[in-house]
Amino acid sequence: AVGVIAVVGRPNVGKSTLVNRILGRRASVVEDTPGVTRDRISYDAEWAGRDFKLVDTGGWETDVEGIDSAIANQAEIAVRLADAVILVVDGQVGLTASDERIVKMLRASGKPITLAVNKVDDNASEYLAAEFWKLGMGEPMSISAMHGRGVGDLLDAAMKTL
Ligand code: GDP
Ligand code: MG
């Protein structure tokens, strides 16, 4: 069976944009409303000649009720079913309390985690990634899902954990 990588993180950090970037032009998963992915959606993907499954998830807001908690639950299920996780955070927004709560739950899952700091759109913005060392998840890998910057290195790192 091929390995499964779940892409998780708060709403609006760019998870679906990243998944779309990895899949190339084969799928369009960014919703009409940015920041909204209602379900847990699995895609067949390939990197460096290796097949894997990539799971896009809705935003993982913690401490919420109603429909948002249902979305969070899909993210938890996705992590449980995955072999590895890419945690996406937003470099432009910076580290949030939600990111820290998500990290706690991911740690409890025991799954290998690769940390992606998205929206680092150019070299001048590289410094944005540094504060995420605080999460204690190892090297924060800066990417721009929108422009493709750093995505290859991120995939190399994540595939090593599969
Ligand atoms: P999700 O909720 O985590 O799936 O986030 P989306 O993929 O829907 O993206 C949320 C918003 O962030 C959209 O307006 C995207 O265009 C924007 N976005 C995603 N990736 C990047 C990026 O690398 N740089 C910038 N500047 N914006 C991005
Ligand atoms: Mg989404």
Image (spheres, helix red, strand yellow):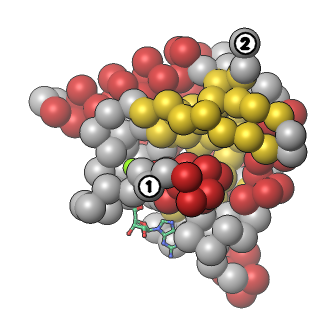
Three-letter amino acid code at the position of disc 1: Ser
Tell me which corner region of the image, top left, top right, bottom left or bottom right, holds residue 32: bottom left
Residue nearer the viewer, 136 or 110: 110
Q: Residue at x 33, y 45 (%)?
A: 37
The residue lying furthest to the left in this view is 66
Q: Which mark is residue 72?
A: none
The residue lying furthest to the front in this view is 26
Give how far across and how far down residue 91 sits, in percent.
57, 66
Residue nearer the viewer, 157 or 94: 157
Q: Which mark is residue 28?
A: 1
The residue lying furthest to the bottom in this view is 124
Give the position of the C terminus as an image quadrant: top right
- The answer to whether residue 137 of the structure is visible from this angle is no
Calculate the distance from the C-alpha at mark 1 to the C-alpha at mark 2. 25 Å
Give how far across and how far down residue 147 sits, in percent.
62, 74
Tell me which corner region of the image, top left, top right, bottom left or bottom right, holds residue 44: top right
Give the position of the N terminus as an image quadrant: top right
Q: Residue at x 33, y 23 (%)?
A: 73
Give how far across and how far down residue 122 sits, in percent.
69, 82
Ligand 1 is found in the corner quadrant, namely: bottom left
Q: Is residue 145 above or below residue 73?
A: below
133 relative to 145 in the view: left or right: right
Q: Residues within 10 Å of mark 1 (few under 14, many from 20)?
A: few
Three-letter amino acid code at the position of disc 2: Ala
Q: Residue at x 66, y 39 (%)?
A: 45
Residue nearer the viewer, 41 or 92: 41
Which secondary structure, mark 2?
loop
78 relative to 65 in the view: left or right: right
Which secondary structure, mark 1?
loop
28 relative to 154 in the view: left or right: left
Q: Residue at x 64, y 52 (%)?
A: 22
Q: Which mark is residue 1?
A: 2
